[in-house]
Amino acid sequence: MGSIIWNKMKHDVKVKLLNEQHKRLFDTLKELYCAMEDKSDKAALLRILNNLSMYIKEHLGTEEALLEKYNYPGLEEQREQHKLFVDKIEEFKKDFENNKFMLYFDMAIFLKSWIANHIEEIDRKYSNFLNDKGVY
């Protein structure tokens, strides 16, 4: 299982700030893969979970506030999707506390799926909408 790299054709949402925040999620996924390959200890996994928690606070809040500011018609879909992301990260935290076997793999599968289904599909829907509002 290999990491994925941010690709302008597939992942660009045409808003610089949001792209930069998305790239941090790719970096976190890469860090997760490195930790898996190195058979890192729990400290590495805890650091990754903490990075994801910070990502939630910064990125999801920024994205929702921007979409709300411009009355994006797909805002509720975004909020629902974001809640699923938050819930899954909370589940991973509990799994970590319970020493769940294969947590690295579960997290990697989830993050790859999130990138493919959320960033590549759901987030890209707002690109032109925000650009039409003068947001780049």
Image (spheres, rainbow, N blue to C red):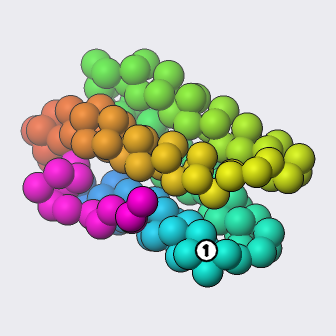
Q: Judge from the rendering whether residue 91 lies leftward or rightward of residue 21; answer left or right.
A: right
Please identify the dominant SS of the magenta region: loop
Residue at x-position 66% and y-position 33%: 87
Q: Is residue 127 magenta?
A: no
Q: In which quadrant of the rendered image does the N terminus lie?
A: bottom left
Q: Amino acid at mark 1?
A: Ala
Residue 136 lies, in percent from the top left, at 19, 55
Is 29 displayed left or right of 18 in the figure?
right
Residue 95, percent across and down?
Answer: 79, 44
Q: Nearer the viewer, residue 47 or 42?
A: 42
Image height check: is 60 above or below 3? above
What is the quadrant of residue 41 in the picture? bottom right
**Mark 1 crowd level (few <14, some 14–19, many ≥20, 10 Å Cα):** some
Question: Which residue is nearer to you in this view: 43 or 38?
Answer: 38
Provide the residue span drawn in magenta. 1-13
Does 77 sit left or right of 102 as displayed?
A: left
**Residue at 25%, 35% in the rendered image:** 121
Extreme-right residue of the structure: 98
Tell me which corner region of the image, top left, top right, bottom left or bottom right, holds residue 45.
bottom right
Q: Which residue is mark 1?
A: 35
